[in-house]
Amino acid sequence: MTYRILMLLENLSYPEDVRVRKEARSLVTSGFEVTLVAPSLKGQPAVERSQGVRIYRFPAAFAKDSRASSFFVEYAWASLWLTLFAYWVWLRHGLDAIHLHNPPDSLFAIALPFRLLGKAIVYDNHDLVPELIEVKFRSRLLTTASEVLEGLSCRWADTVIVANDFARDLLVQRHGLESEKVSVVRNGPSQVELDALGLFGANCSDFDVRFGFIGAIDPQDGVESIIEALYLLRQMEPDLRFACRIIGNGLALRDVRERTLELGLAEEIEFCDFLPWPKAMRALAECDICIDAAPLNPYHRVNEAVKVLEYMAHGKPMVLTDSPGHRAAAGDAALYVESEDYKGFAERLLELTHDRELARRLGANGRDRFEREFSWEIMECRLTSVYTRLQGR
């Protein structure tokens, strides 16, 4: 009998969550049956089958601001729908395993009754939520509560999947897990999908240089630092014709836009908002130098950013905050700057702008590193091996 997997997703919609999309489609290709429940965006059907994945969607109620109470309402609403759909899928289609995508880390409560029925639980840790909460809310109570939920998610799961080595080591140490229980499945894009788009080596000739950023624009992500650095860059070299493309959205987008206007950078900064993945990759491919100025906070210190893996997949030179997470991912494919050093960031951007040979070398290093270590084609083998073990337990 085909092994039946139910995926529960709250944090993003589907297929907009790229990690979940890759996992679901890879498992279907490997012969598993995948049903997924996720919040819906405007215009998405409530029931759909896409590339072999059976999808059920519920009305989304995402947090409207950065207050903890707003997230609590979001999670409570989604948990109700996810619980109802879990029983619906079990009764209608059957299931052998429940795959929980965090955040939040409270979804294990939905899966516990099914564990008593002999179903397997897979906990997929997208983000280290305690570190994220520490940065977002600076509340010891909320941080401690999130550590408890994270620990329960790890202990009740049959296997844990994480996105990088930092998360694996931290979870093993924090919750006393056996290392064999935790598997690393990174977030790198599919080399096959990217190559099919025909984007490798693309650039834009409208400006002397175009910088690029893709990702979340929340208060903890440091996108304002990019704006400050670009303001200094313009002071250092007024005649340079540059532009910066910012792809993404989040709770800090409004503040970032306002700061852009205050500094008189409206003509240089292009805000693309959220784009479907193929369009986002096309927009990124047209940039010459890619950037991430995430501050050195507890969350980003150990975060292996998806954006960095996407930059490397495109063969783009990078300027990044000097953090363990960035170093582990990018290695010798980037120039590094101390956290919130706006002047240093601007200087490194100018260095890559004028030293085309250095830029070419860094881009080639990144592409080679991506192909050898980070492409999804490598990671999906790890994912399917996790389920092969569960199927034969």
Image (cartoon, rainbow, N blue to C red):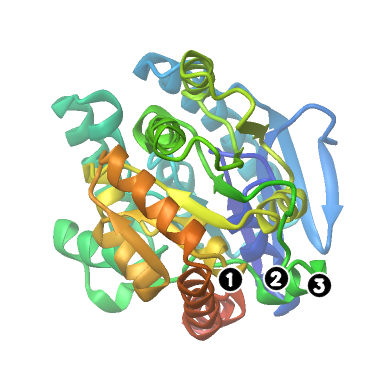
Mark 3 residue type: Ala
Residue located at (29% from left, 40% from top): 343
How many residues crowd around disc 2 within 10 Å: few (fewer than 14), some, or many (20 or more)?
Answer: few
Q: Mark 3 highlights which residue?
A: 196
Mark 2 residue type: Gly
Q: Nearer the viewer, residue 280 or 271?
A: 271
Mark 1 residue type: Gly
Q: Is residue 389 above or below residue 28?
A: below
Instruction: Give residue 267's quadrant in the image.
Output: top right
Mark 1 vs mark 3, CA separation in Å = 15 Å
> Of callouts 2 and 3, which one flags the residue occurring earlier in the amino acid sequence?
3
Could you say which disc has been placed on residue 43 in the image? none
Residue located at (47% from left, 81% from top): 373
Q: Is residue 288 above or below residue 357?
A: above
Q: Nearer the viewer, residue 369 or 1?
A: 369
Q: Nearer the viewer, residue 223 or 15?
A: 223
Left or right position of 382 against 95: left
Q: Mark 1 highlights which residue?
A: 315
Left or right position of 111 against 248: left
Name the front one of labels 2 and 3.
2
Name the front one of labels 1 and 3.
1
> Of callouts 1 and 3, which one flags the residue occurring earlier in the amino acid sequence?
3
Residue located at (68% from left, 72% from top): 26
Mark 2 vs mark 3, CA separation in Å = 13 Å
> Of callouts 1 and 2, which one flags the residue occurring earlier in the amino acid sequence?
2
User: Residue 61 location in percent, x, y?
Assistant: 60, 21
Q: Mark 2 highlights which residue?
A: 201
Q: Are marks 1 and 2 in contact (CB under 8 Å)?
A: yes
Left or right position of 160 against 201: left
User: Residue 177 location in percent, x, y?
Assistant: 21, 67
